[in-house]
Image (cartoon, rainbow, N blue to C red):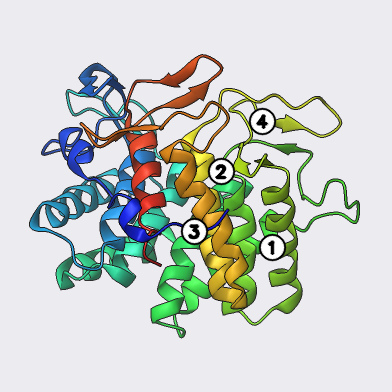
Amino acid sequence: MAPRPDRDVPAPPFAHLVRLTDDTGLFEHARHATARRAHGYCTDDVARGLVVASREADPSAEVIRLAECYLTFLTHAQDAQGAFHNRLGFHRGWTDQPGLGDWWGRALWGLGTAAARCPVPWIRQEALLAFALGASCRATAPRAMAFAGLGAAELLRTDPGNGPAAELLADAAMVIGRPGPDPRWPWPEERLSYANAALAETLIVAGDLLDDTPVRAAGLRMLTWLLEIQISDGHLSVLPSSGWLRGNPRLRHDQQPIEVAALADACATAAASTGDAGWHTGTRQSVDWFLGANDIGRAMWDPATGGGYDGLTLHGPNLNQGAESTLALISTLQHRTR
């Protein structure tokens, strides 16, 4: 698919993210474009919000306000040992205990990105403090460690001497593991589930930043296969929310925007790592998935609201515009000029 001019691709829209954000945090769910306050907030989404807000090279005052809000939420969610709560009710009470699940990893991803990229000095400083505390912990789940590793990689790019970040990234690569020798299933797990490309991306950056060529090669091999199996008739057709168990039939729906966003990030990282511009095709196919180059030929976002649709079903888009889907839209479109 030949790339179209950047002017054909919309700029990352923050209007709906602003709509879902109050003075506490980011509402998780929406009915169409209306926030569902009853469902409250979660660290998972707030952390992803800090990632996209910090990635903006020239953020507006509105985007900086989002970054301030999300950073404050994450520091409130963190306990004295570095773990994080995930669920906060609308009435401002935590409904869970601090832990080291995916939300811990995503919190470190957001904090590492803010510490490395945010143009506001005090946000960088506070994010670094919270990251350092969280980086003293270790999770056992590959995705939690992958997300944390991506935050560590952000810091190592700007501060190669950051020992805790280097140790965290190395440990993340170890927990993820390596693909087996079977070319039909070059993946370290028996089941592909969600945000799969984040595992490959973490190995690629770990290999790059820690000077470990075999780890980098493993990540590139995994990403090559993951992209190949998710292309149909020249467009992206990502794995459904049910995942895919090795040896079992593969379903096509419901497809989630988080898969597309993870692929866009990983392909952009692979292009930067290898210098091979061919990887930009995967990033562009991810952008085009949101614009209508998908299995049903329908746009997966609402230009009127700036919200991303929650899923692609056999009958069309799920028109609810929750935080995860909107953040996936924004993060993918942030690659439009890279």
Separation (CA) of disc 4 from disc 3: 29 Å
Q: Amino acid at mark 4?
A: Gly
Separation (CA) of disc 2 from disc 4: 10 Å
Q: Amino acid at mark 3?
A: Pro
Taking depth in this image into account, of 251 and 237 the one nearest to the observer is 237
- Badge 4 is on which residue? 243
Separation (CA) of disc 3 from disc 1: 25 Å
x then y, percent, for residue 226: 69, 49
State yes or no: discs 1 and 4 in contact (Cβ < 8 Å).
no
| Secondary structure of the residue carrying numbered label 1 | helix
Separation (CA) of disc 2 from disc 1: 14 Å
Q: Which image quarter holds the C terminus?
A: bottom left
Mark yes or no: residue 101 visible: no
- Badge 1 is on which residue? 219
- Badge 2 is on which residue? 195
Say whether disc 4 or disc 3 marks the residue closer to the N-terminus.
Answer: 3
Q: Quadrant of residue 301?
A: top left
x then y, percent, for residue 38: 24, 17
State yes or no: discs 2 and 1 in contact (Cβ < 8 Å).
no
Q: Is residue 95 left or right of residue 1?
A: left
Separation (CA) of disc 1 from disc 4: 20 Å
x then y, percent, for residue 121: 17, 73
